[in-house]
């Protein structure tokens, strides 16, 4: 049996008391408070949907209907995309009623064959508007395409076929005229440059037959006219000599004119 002395027991007890006191009297350091960031707001969901069927609204006179094809852009928050799409699909019929109400008055101001004018007017009216006006559910904006009644389209088809045919014919005639003018201008330049070349007429025979024929006729005409004019001037000069006018300034001027004319057109210049 082991017997502990009272001194050793007392020292052990004091040591444990001192350790306890140190732990108890140690200042308590507060743990730092970590502030967590606020959760991000729910992402905005966007879905584009076209109507299942066109919305029919009567045109002026109530005999024909316009076919209005809406294209909706839906937005929302706070749901999964699958849930959001299901909610949107459930609202499509109601949205079609909104478009019908918005289009009815405008449609009756337009004639049945003026669908493109109604489309512009209706899109301008719908721009910037959102439905429903309040609440947390999906909301939509809308743009539309407008087509005329099928019976109107059948009536318009012959008109447009004839118009297209006339416009195409006009464009073709205009193109032909422009090309003919361009070709004529080019041939005029070619003939003008080649006519003064003494070997041109022979070289033209080496080209296609039609060009050689046309150029030959052109060259003959250019030579024939100056020669006839020179002959007239020569006869006039001889007539003045027959009258005994002598070498006057008048006859000398005529003679100089004849010689200059002959040189210009490549004719033989006769010696005085």
Image (cartoon, grey):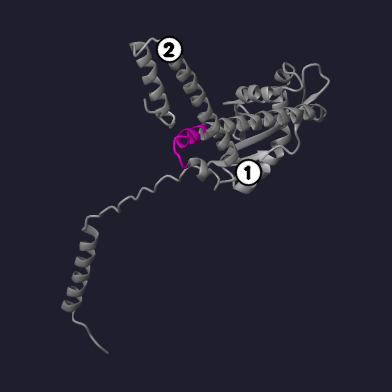
Residue in the image at 59% along x and 34% along y: 136
Residue 138 appears anywhere in the view: no
Residue in the image at 23% along x and 62% along y: 23
Query: Which quadrant would the C terminus be assigned to in this image?
Result: top left
Residue 102 to residue 195: above or below: above
Is 202 or 142 nearer to us in this picture?
202
> Label 2: which residue?
240
Query: Which quadrant would the N terminus be assigned to in this image?
Result: bottom left
Crowd around label 2: few <14 · some 14–19 · many ≥20 (10 Å): some
Is 154 or 271 nearer to us in this picture?
271
Q: What's the CA distance linking mark 1 and mark 2?
A: 113 Å
Q: Foreground mark, 1 or 2?
A: 2
> Label 1: which residue?
84
Q: Is residue 230 magenta?
A: no
Residue 91 position, x and y percent, is 70, 36
Residue in the image at 68% along x and 25% along y: 116
Judged from the image, the secondary structure of the residue bearing numbered disc 1 is: helix
Q: Is residue 191 magenta?
A: yes
Q: Earlier in the sequence, mark 1 or mark 2?
A: 1
Crowd around label 1: few <14 · some 14–19 · many ≥20 (10 Å): many
Is 259 or 272 nearer to us in this picture?
272
Magenta extent: 188-199
């Amino acid at each position: 049996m082991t017997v502990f002395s009272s001194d050793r027991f007392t020292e052990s007890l004091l040591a444990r008391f001192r350790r306890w006191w140190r732990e108890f009297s140690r200042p308590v350091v507060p743990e730092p408070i970590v502030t967590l960031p606020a959760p991000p707001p729910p992402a905005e969901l966007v879905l584009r949907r076209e109507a299942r069927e066109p919305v029919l609204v009567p045109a002026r006179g109530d005999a024909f209907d316009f076919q209005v094809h809406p294209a909706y852009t839906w937005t929302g928050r706070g749901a999964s995309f699958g849930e959001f799409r299901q909610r949107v699909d459930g609202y499509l019929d109601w949205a079609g009623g909104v478009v019908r109400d918005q289009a009815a008055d405008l449609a009756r101001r337009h004639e049945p064959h003026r669908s493109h004018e109604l489309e512009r007017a209706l899109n301008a009216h719908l721009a910037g508007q959102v439905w429903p006006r309040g609440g947390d559910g999906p909301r939509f904006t809308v743009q539309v395409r407008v087509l005329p009644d099928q019976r109107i389209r059948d009536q318009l088809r012959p008109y447009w076929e004839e118009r297209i045919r006339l416009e195409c014919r006009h464009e073709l005639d205009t193109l032909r005229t422009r090309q003919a003018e361009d070709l004529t201008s080019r041939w005029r330049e070619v003939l003008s440059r080649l006519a003064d070349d003494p070997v041109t007429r022979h070289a033209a025979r080496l080209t296609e037959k039609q060009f050689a024929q046309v150029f030959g006729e052109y060259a003959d005409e250019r030579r024939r006219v100056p020669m006839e004019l020179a002959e007239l001037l020569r006869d006039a000069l001889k007539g003045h000599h027959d009258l005994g006018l002598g070498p006057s300034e008048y006859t000398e001027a005529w003679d100089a004119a004849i010689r200059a004319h002959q040189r210009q057109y490549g004719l033989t210049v006769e010696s005085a």
